[in-house]
Image (tube, helix red, strand yellow):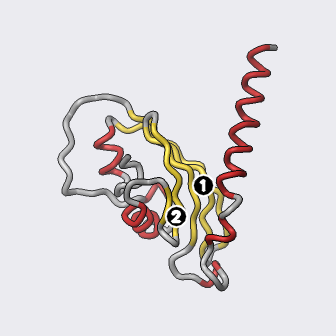
């Protein structure tokens, strides 16, 4: 029962954290209809290894170290984290240090709103940054 309580409280705490982080999303959304925007709108909580960052696109803001680059990559992929552009100009060391990355949030464009819950384990932090167009580069 102790494990269930801890898991349940952990899940409830994560839900509350997400609700708190996204409470201001409506105020950050661009004026006019988001569905009419050719670029879309997104709000995400990102984790890479043991680090976390918040990201809102547009305006390209958040605790991510380079929100403009991260948002540009997400826009190029149409909000599809499976299709994030790779930075082919980065050479990463071939050292295997598994780096789990996750994005949770919402993406809204002309296709309507979509819940994002993406996770992938990269070979190391450098690969996580390069293979995600900087989205997981923190």
Q: Is residue 124 left or right of residue 46?
A: left
Residue 24 point in image, percent of width and height: 67, 63
Name the one closer to the observer, 12 or 111: 12
Residue 92 point in image, percent of width and height: 21, 42
Location of residue 24 with respect to 34 vertically, above or below: above
Residue 47 point in image, percent of width and height: 49, 43
Residue 1 point in image, percent of width and height: 81, 14
Q: Residue at x 72, y 25 (%)?
A: 7
N-terminal label among 2 and 1: 2
Location of residue 108 with respect to 130 vertically, above or below: below
Q: Is residue 56 left or right of residue 23?
A: left
Q: Residue 108 falls in which quadrant of the image?
A: bottom right
Under circle 1, the secondary element is strand
- For disc 2, the marked residue is 79
Q: Residue at x 35, y 60 (%)?
A: 85
> Real-space Cα distance between discs 2 and 1?
8 Å
Q: Is the residue marked by circle 2 packed among few (<14), some (14-19), or many (20+) residues within 10 Å?
A: many
Q: Residue 97 falls in which quadrant of the image?
A: top left
Q: Residue 74 falls in which quadrant of the image?
A: bottom left
Location of residue 52 with respect to 59 vertically, above or below: above
Q: Residue at x 22, y 56 (%)?
A: 88
- For disc 1, the marked residue is 116
Q: Are marks 2 and 1 in contact (CB under 8 Å)?
A: yes
């Amino acid at each position: 029962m102790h494990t269930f309580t801890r898991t349940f409280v952990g899940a409830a705490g994560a839900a509350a954290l997400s609700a708190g982080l996204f409470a201001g999303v409506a105020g950050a959304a661009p004026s006019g209809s988001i569905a009419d925007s050719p670029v879309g709108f997104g709000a995400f909580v990102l984790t890479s290894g043991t680090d976390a960052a918040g990201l809102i696109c547009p305006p390209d803001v958040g605790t991510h170290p380079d929100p403009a680059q991260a948002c540009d990559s997400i826009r190029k992929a149409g909000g599809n984290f499976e299709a994030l552009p790779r930075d082919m100009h980065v050479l990463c060391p071939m050292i295997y240090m598994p780096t789990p990355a996750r994005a949770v949030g919402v993406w809204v464009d002309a296709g309507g709103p979509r819940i994002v819950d993406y996770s992938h384990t990269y070979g190391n932090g450098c690969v996580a940054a390069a293979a995600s167009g900087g989205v997981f580069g923190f």
